[in-house]
Image: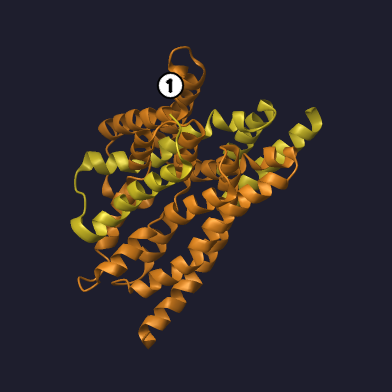
Amino acid sequence: MNTENKTWYARGLRDGLPIMLGYAAVGFTLGIAARNAGLTAFQAGLASLLNNASAGEKAGFTVIEHSEGYLAMAVMMLIINARYLLMSCSLSQKLSPETGLIPRLIIGFEVTDEIFGVQMNVPGMINPFYTYGVITMALPGWSLGTYFGVALGNVLPVNVVSALSVGLYGMFLAIIIPPAKKSRVIAALVVIAMAASCAFAYLPVVSNISAGMRVIILTVVISAAAALLFPVKEEDEHAA
Amino acid sequence: MQHNVYVYIFVMFAVTYLIRVLPLTLIRKPIKNRFIRSFLYYVPYVTLAVMTFPDIVQATTAPIAGLLALIAGVALAWCGKSLFTVAVVSCVVVFVTEWIIL
């Protein structure tokens, strides 16, 4: 490693520290959800090691819990994680043309909201060693957090696990509510999505639709309708 | 049909990784289509909302505890409290509620 790469790697480690702490906490609650879906600590830790996506993994665990088929899983990942496609497209503009295939394969492995964010904050082109530094911190935080969520969930008393089970949903709320406060469209979408989800869970006929398919169908229909009726301007995308 | 958890995890990984890595390796062009950009912009909010309710009510031993956690979580997030605070208070609400009523 030359001096410049070393400096960037160290900077990545530094910027990755708060991400690691946050990921450990979110990963832990994700582990509680994985445990409730029937995964072992190793399986959940492995899923987190390979996926690094809270909403995507939660949805994936739902598919596993209800044994819904591999195609349903693939479609689910495609839809829920499709936004990473946008992030990777932006990120590709921040990599110099000389960046080789291996660094691109590694950087692409860990495109998450937070890591995308810190990389976009780097002035000019990204030195891949910066990203390696961030990943060195973030990845263990995320996967070990998930692992221990399951492992501790198995030994903690029932009332504590019941309480911890809402932690992930609390985090989801903390992500969707502040933008909903600023945008009436998002606020309406959140209300409609929750109401529709509730209807699909309890009303006759539609309640026969599996939990995973429910997430897929409602996400596509509601998001597509919103995109048609309220297309976003580029400024809005960056504001969120 | 019996499904293997490791195959599920591999499918999760394969699809998610392709989504992330293709733009960095092969495509390398920004997506211009406004409908697609708008759709992808709205997806996380809709997905997270769909997954949160009614699941939060079903995740707890007593449904009312989950409902109170939802209300507390929305209120705190509305007031701009951090992700960590919202999550911890939601858990505490469930713990205390179930301690009282069960």
Q: Quadrant of residue B30?
A: bottom left
Q: Residue furthest bottom?
A: A3
Chain A shade in the render: orange
Q: Please state the chain letter of the residue tagged with numbered disc 1 in the rendered image.
A: A
Residue A103 showing in the rendered view: yes
* A103 or B54, nearer to the observer: A103
The quarter of the picture where residue A185 lies is: top left
Query: The residue tagged with tag 1: helix, strand or loop?
Result: loop
Q: Residue at x 34, y 35 (%)?
A: A71
Q: Could you tell me residue B25's position as x and y percent? A: 23, 60
Residue on which the image places disc 1: A209
Q: Nearer the viewer, residue A120 or B95?
A: B95
Q: Horizontal and vertical percent for residue A78?
A: 33, 41
Give the residue type that dot 1 points to: Ile
Vertical arrangement, residue A83 with respect to residue A88, above or below? above
**Residue A65 % position (x, y):** 51, 34
The quarter in which the N terminus of chain A is drawn is bottom left
Using residue A85 as the reference point, say whether residue B67 is left or right of it.
right
Q: Colour of chain B?
A: yellow
Task: Identify whether A80 is placed above or below A53.
Answer: above
**The quarter of the displayed image where residue A36 is located:** top right
Q: Residue at x 45, y 76 (%)?
A: A11
Q: Residue at x 56, y 37 (%)?
A: A37
A96 or B10: nearer the viewer: B10
Q: Position of residue B4 (x, y in %)?
A: 46, 40
